[in-house]
Amino acid sequence: METTLDGLRDVKLYQRKEGYRFSVDALLLYSFVNVTHVKDAVDLGAGSGVIGLLLARKYPGAKILLVELQQTLYKLAVRNIGLNGLTDRVNALLMDISSVHEAYPAMSCDIVVSNPPYRKPLSGRLSQGEERAVARHEVSLRLPELAKAAAHLLRSRGRFFMIFHPERLVEIIDALRAENLEPKRIRFVHNDSGSVSKIVLVEAVKEGRAGLKVERPLILYNKEGSYTEEVKAMYE
């Protein structure tokens, strides 16, 4: 398994050279998490562990669980936990997200984050290789299953943060509300000021009251093609 050693903010990660690799989505979701204090957090579909490890740095006292279905990515997550010296607070679990209720107690987490596959199997260009296909398409995980897992893990008033495709925003809201997760904050992400949104960030609160805040759009690139100041600040 050929790997590369990469860095993002204050985290180092080994990644598959040809398999699934993290993108700016991971940084956007990490930056969207705005909770002041976190004791326990879970990253559902953690991949090589990038978001969970970033959160471990952001919340020095928190315990983080990385849940990953694919064995190749799970092994990388375990390796990356050790690489960053976080074995005392970060653990990885190899299992299907839809079965997380069998291994982790209910109402045990302050926050749950997820960068799940958002393309339906029959829509969009299928990713090359099984690893990337499972990570980007709903081959092994459906949106209602993700919402159910998050609802199981969260304490009352706990928060679920996810990143998804805006074309499926109505599905997201329906799936979340079916599990008593009330959407409270969304932010649309655009490549530039003249493009349509292809990414949406969503925060939901377990047993929260109705009331949705739509934040100002997040623009990734300036006219000349460089990252905007806001995105540059996320990398620093």
Image: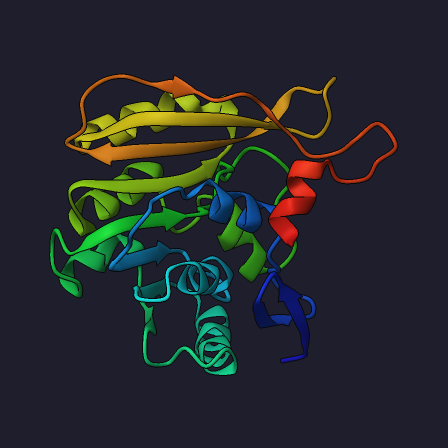
Left or right: 57, with 153 as reference point: right
Q: Quadrant of residue 17?
A: bottom right
Identify the image's colour scheme: rainbow, by chain, secondary structure or one colour: rainbow
Residue 57: x %, y % from top left: 45, 64
Residue located 75% across and 40% down the image: 227
Residue located 64% across and 52% down the image: 235
Quick one: which residue is furthest to the right in this view? Answer: 224
Residue 115: x %, y % from top left: 46, 47
Q: Does residue 137 lie above or below 210 as drawn?
A: below
Quarter of the image that includes the N terminus? bottom right
Task: Using the rendered image of the protein, determine whether residue 133 is visible from the camera's viewpoint.
Answer: yes
Task: Using the rendered image of the protein, determine whether residue 127 is visible from the camera's viewpoint.
Answer: no
Foreground pick, 131 / 221? 221
Residue 146: x %, y % from top left: 31, 44
Residue located 48% across and 60% down the image: 54
Q: Quadrant of residue 162?
A: top left
Quarter of the image that includes the C terminus? bottom right
Left or right: 192, with 105 as reference point: right
